[in-house]
Image (tube, rainbow, N blue to C red):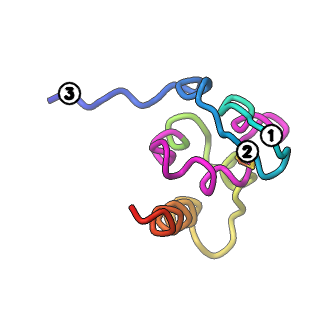
Amino acid sequence: MAKAKPPEKDAYDDMEMWRCRQLGGPVTFKYCRVMNEGLPCPRLPGCWGARIDLIEYLEANFAVEEMEKVFGSESKTRLARIIETINRVREEKGE
Ligand code: SF4
């Protein structure tokens, strides 16, 4: 079976977050993926991690250096930190 094509950069652009914790009002994913000088918002895992396959999306569309710029590159790898955040959000939502 052929592997599914990874999501394009604009695949989730029309999805809406009813209340952005930074702006206080609704925003679309399109805003979230570019609001940080053209890069994603650092809060992406907490806001979108339970709604889309964020790891697959980020890996398909952003370079390691870009992810490190957004999420930091301390002791843990970027992927480990993102997975940890997504799992925490899912647990909080009882998934
Ligand atoms: S990811 Fe950032 S910009 Fe998007 S809704 Fe969350 S806090 Fe707001």
Magenta residues span 32-57
What's under tag 3, amino acid-wise?
Ala
Q: Is residue 1 left or right of residue 34?
A: left
Q: Which residue is mark 3?
A: 2
Q: Which residue is mark 2?
A: 19
Q: Residue at x 83, y 46 (%)?
A: 24
Percent coordinates x, y for residue 79 in the rendering: 52, 59
Q: Nearer the viewer, mark 3 or mark 2?
A: 2
Q: Is residue 89 above or below residue 10?
A: below
In the rendered structure, which disc, 1 or 2, sits on the residue that comes first in sequence? 2
**Secondary structure of the residue carrying numbered label 3:** loop
Mark 1 to mark 3 CA distance (whole Å) = 40 Å
Q: Is 47 or 18 nearer to us in this picture?
A: 18
- Say if disc 2 is inside 8 Å of ligand 1: yes
In the rendered structure, which disc, 1 or 3, sits on the residue that comes first in sequence? 3
Q: Which residue is mark 1?
A: 25
Percent coordinates x, y for residue 90 in the rendering: 46, 62
In the rendered structure, which disc, 3 or 2, sits on the residue that comes first in sequence? 3
Q: Is residue 76 left or right of residue 71?
A: left
**Secondary structure of the residue carrying numbered label 1:** loop
